[in-house]
Amino acid sequence: MQPNSAIAMSSGSLTKRWIVYLVGIYILTLGISLAIRAGIGISPQSSLTRTMTVIFPALSQGTYSFLLELIMLVLAYVVAPKKFKITFIAGLIPALALSIFLDFNLGLTSFIKLDVYYTKFILLAIGDAFLAFGLYLMIQANLVLIPVDLFVNTVVNKFGKKWGNVKTVFDCSLLVVSACIGLLFLAEVKFIREGTIINAILVGQYIRLYTYLFNKRKASQTHENTIKS
């Protein structure tokens, strides 16, 4: 998620934005859960936390997700300690919500078991659509960055690189770590398959679609208001 600068608004507007943000997180975790149930590969971050649940099943995937966010918050401080603000810790609030919603939705979708490949592909496409829409809502709410995105943003600002390039390197790094941990503890790579590549392609395209539809609707409303006035 490419971050935007937060804009000060009234308390009422801020409340609405937080509602949109949390709804976005819930929809995003529902999408992640559906993608996991598809069983043909998941996103880099999810593949790492999902692999950990196989190695050490005592903790839930949501818990591992939150622990990863904590690590990223610490790394953001390590990369640029002088630029680190105490308000960045607020990013742990949506991170906690994400971990809770993720565990809830994984339980909610636990009944889904597919055997036919094309149904798995369809479920992955649906899951990615939900994931992208949740991400889109979070971007629109324009609030605090969760630590994973904060870390990427910190690296971008520290070294002056493009956000998309840094995010790609970061995601690839997570895949490498996930694969290495899987090979070390399980003697196989888990949850990294063709669906991982499909996820990377579809999520970006879905967000482009949602942005196009939103802008088109906004332009239409503006046109109608202009005619009425």
Image: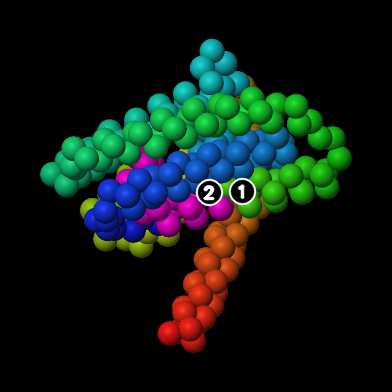
- Label disc, if present, on residue 173 of the rendered structure: none
Amino acid carrying label 2: it is Gly
Query: Circle 2 sits on which residue?
Result: 134
Name the residue located 34 percent from the left edge and 33 percent from the top edge.
Answer: 92
Can you give x and y, in whole percent of width and height, for residue 184 in the image? 55, 24
Q: Residue furthest top?
A: 58
Answer yes or no: is residue 72 visible.
Answer: no
Q: Main secondary structure of the magenta part?
A: helix
> Is 17 drawn above or below residue 56 in the view shown?
below
Observer-nearest of 140 and 37: 140
Amino acid carrying label 1: it is Phe
Name the residue located 81 percent from the left edge and 35 percent from the top edge.
Answer: 114
Marks 1/2: CA distance?
A: 6 Å
Can you give x and y, in whole percent of width and height, for residue 42 in the image? 62, 41
- Label disc, if present, on residue 130 of the rendered structure: 1
> Is 202 drawn above or below residue 171 in the view shown?
below
Label 1: element kind: helix
Point out the stretch of residues depicted in magenta: 133-148
Residue contact between numbered discs 1 and 2, judged by CB atoms under 8 Å: yes
Q: Residues within 10 Å of mark 1 (few under 14, many from 20)?
A: many
Q: Is 166 left, or right, of 182 in this rendering?
A: left
